[in-house]
Amino acid sequence: MKEYKIEKDLEGIRIDKAVSQKDSNISRAMVQKMLEDGKILVNGKVPKSSYKLVEGDIVEIEEIVLKDVDIKPDETIPLDIVYEDDDILVINKQKGLVVHPGNGNPDKTLVNAIMAKCKDRLSGIGGEIRPGIVHRIDKDTSGLLIVAKNDKAHINISEQIKEHKVKKTYIALVRGILKENNATIDMPIARSTKDRVKMAVSKTGKNAITHIKVLERYNGYTLVEVNIETGRTHQIRVHMAEIGFPLVGDSVYSNGKNPFGVEGQMLHSMRLEFKHPTTNKEMKIEAPIPEYFEKVLEELEREKNI
């Protein structure tokens, strides 16, 4: 652990800003991630990123040890690039593809494919296993996500996400008939205490807000458009299951009924709206729903008209 005592010149400055000033190798976005992970302490306790330092505070920082991680570029993984410039990529991720390497997924991930495309032109804020990755979507969720080619773009998009300025719109097929045309789910989410693989609605969780709009009702199913204000792990899947309308194909948060034989939840990130990190131009990027999704909807439409 690195340790230093706060002098008068840093008094009143936010902890995330102060640490990045003291150590130029650690960006402010990295500091915020370290604070979330409990790797920075003030007077022996984990502070909020908004904490303002007081003269005499003792700050401890867990030293970053870069692991010897060998992530190989993989040109065999197809990339559907919807938008690209010098700062960002927007990719339409296919269902079944993990975003970055991790336990059980050492390779064959989106990161391996991106590295083959961009070589070393990716931001380093996400660390050695998440180069360029600003936000994620689940393995079996398809659709749009933003990749940063440099640290400046990464920090800018991260700040927009944190301030709820990136509008993420999904389309999902759920079991059951939603009566309301529009609804908002405001329920905090935390790691499940019964199953560590799952997330769950919990009073002690982080706030999570999901907005739902009904697009179409079928026999026993509803097609919905979903906007999320927050980006909690499995948020849409947890919220929809909690109110009794689990996503079709979701093997984790539903009881397994899946007459269409689809693998994984029917959830697609179809639209992203944000400001370009360099030009400040309003960006609105869309991706059509996958072919398998279209086929299920066509089948439901035929049944409805019988």
Image (tube, helix red, strand yellow):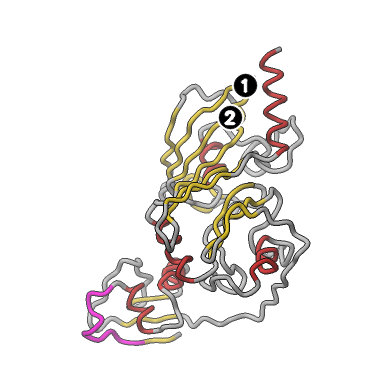
Residue 13 image position (x, y, % from top left): 26, 74
- Apparent side of residue 53 relative to residue 288 in the rendered image (left or right): left
Residue 178 image position (x, y, % from top left): 52, 25
Magenta stretch bounds: 4-13
View extreme (top): residue: 306
How many numbered markers are drawn? Answer: 2
- Apparent side of residue 15 relative to residue 156 in the rendered image (left or right): left
Residue 11 lies in the magenta stretch:
yes
Q: Read off the residue under disc 1.
A: 218
Residue 186 image position (x, y, % from top left): 41, 40
Residue 302 image position (x, y, % from top left): 71, 19
Above or below, 4 against 108 in this view is below
- Apparent side of residue 171 relative to residue 282 in the rendered image (left or right): right
**Res. 205 visible in picture:** no
Q: Residues within 10 Å of mark 1 (few under 14, many from 20)?
A: some
**Res. 247 visible in picture:** yes
Residue type (three-letter) at the residue carrying disc 2: Leu
- Label 2, label 1: how far apart the Cα atoms are: 8 Å
Task: Mark 2 and mark 1 in contact? Answer it, CB < 8 Å.
Answer: yes
Q: Nearer the viewer, residue 154 or 121?
A: 121
Q: Residues within 10 Å of mark 2 (few under 14, many from 20)?
A: many
Between disc 2 and disc 1, whose residue precedes? 1
Q: Read off the residue under disc 2.
A: 223
Q: Quadrant of the C terminus?
A: top right
Q: Nearer the viewer, residue 116 or 182?
A: 116
Residue type (three-letter) at the residue carrying disc 1: Tyr
